[in-house]
Image (cartoon, rainbow, N blue to C red):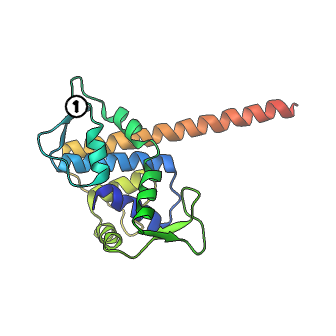
């Protein structure tokens, strides 16, 4: 299990309204945090530096590690989030469906995507739920960035790893940038519609 998979399951389980783009950026950040924890990468300022430890045995983390820039100047965290995050939530959904960890949802709407599915009761789902219930700091912080709040707690999660904090800040900035783009498009589309309607 990885932080990204746990985040995806929590987002689906709680049925919050989460944009696919926001979630994809957060999933990319979660992967990077897991790679940092495994020693597969390090953070130097705002750059991702490949480390000496092997990549954890996970398909998505393997793909993420394989896509790292391995020569200086290394890739900026924000650039990597945008590149790695492209359509990442859809990729996680497809993988969970392929492994029969998602099932069709009987009613209601999925908070992201067009397919209506929900997690199956598996050890992976229970582990994600346990991490969420225990307010695991990294998972809680990533969930908060995409608008999933823990109603039972007003406390900020305590994070004591500078590299992780740097990644979380980059994810937050990227999600805010995406929201700004959405708002600008809405304003432009509205102005265009008004132009056609005339005075």
Furthest residue toward left = 52
Where does the image place residue 45, in percent across and percent down from the top left?
A: 22, 31
Where does the image place residue 173, in percent across and percent down from the top left?
A: 40, 39
Furthest residue toward right = 199
Q: Quadrant of the C terminus?
A: top right
- In the image, taking residue 24 as reference, residue 134 lies left or right, namely left
Residue nearest the observer in this picture, 27 or 157: 27
Q: Is residue 5 shown above or below 194?
A: below
**Which residue is at a point 55% across and 63% down the rendered structure image?**
110
Q: Which residue is mark 1?
A: 45
Residue 113 position by quadrant: bottom right
**Which residue is at a point 22% across and 30% down the rendered structure image?**
70
Q: Residues within 10 Å of mark 1 (few under 14, many from 20)?
A: few
Where does the image place residue 21, in percent across and percent down from the top left?
A: 49, 46
Secondary structure at badge 1 equals loop
Residue nearest the observer in this picture, 156 or 31: 31
Q: Is residue 198 shown above or below 164?
A: above
Q: Is residue 157 shown above or below 32?
A: below
Furthest residue toward top = 73
Q: Is residue 151 visible?
A: yes
Tally of numbered discs: 1
Q: Is residue 157 visible?
A: no
Furthest residue toward front = 98
Q: Quadrant of the N terminus?
A: bottom left
Where does the image place residue 148, in percent across and percent down from the top left?
A: 44, 59
Residue nearest the observer in this picture, 105 or 48: 105
**Which residue is at a point 35% across and 74% down the rendered structure image?**
122
Residue nearest the observer in this picture, 120 or 11: 120
């Amino acid at each position: 299990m990885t932080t990204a998979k746990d985040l995806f399951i929590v987002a689906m389980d709680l049925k919050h309204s989460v944009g696919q783009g926001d979630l994809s950026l957060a999933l990319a950040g979660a992967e990077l945090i897991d790679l940092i924890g495994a020693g597969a990468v390090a953070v130097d300022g705002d750059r991702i530096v490949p480390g000496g430890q092997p990549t954890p045995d996970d398909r998505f983390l393997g793909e993420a590690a394989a896509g790292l820039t391995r020569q200086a100047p290394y890739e900026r965290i924000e650039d990597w989030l945008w590149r790695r995050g492209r359509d990442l939530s859809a990729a996680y959904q497809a993988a969970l469906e392929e492994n029969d960890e998602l099932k069709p949802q009987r009613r209601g709407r999925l908070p992201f995507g067009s397919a209506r599915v929900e997690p199956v009761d598996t050890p992976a789902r229970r582990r994600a739920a346990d991490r969420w219930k225990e307010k695991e700091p990294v998972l809680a912080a990533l969930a908060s960035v995409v608008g999933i709040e823990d109603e039972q707690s007003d406390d900020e999660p305590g994070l004591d790893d500078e590299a992780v904090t740097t990644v979380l800040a980059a994810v937050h900035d990227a999600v805010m940038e995406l929201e700004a783009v959405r708002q600008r498009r809405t304003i432009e589309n509205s102005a265009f519609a008004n132009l056609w309607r005339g005075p």
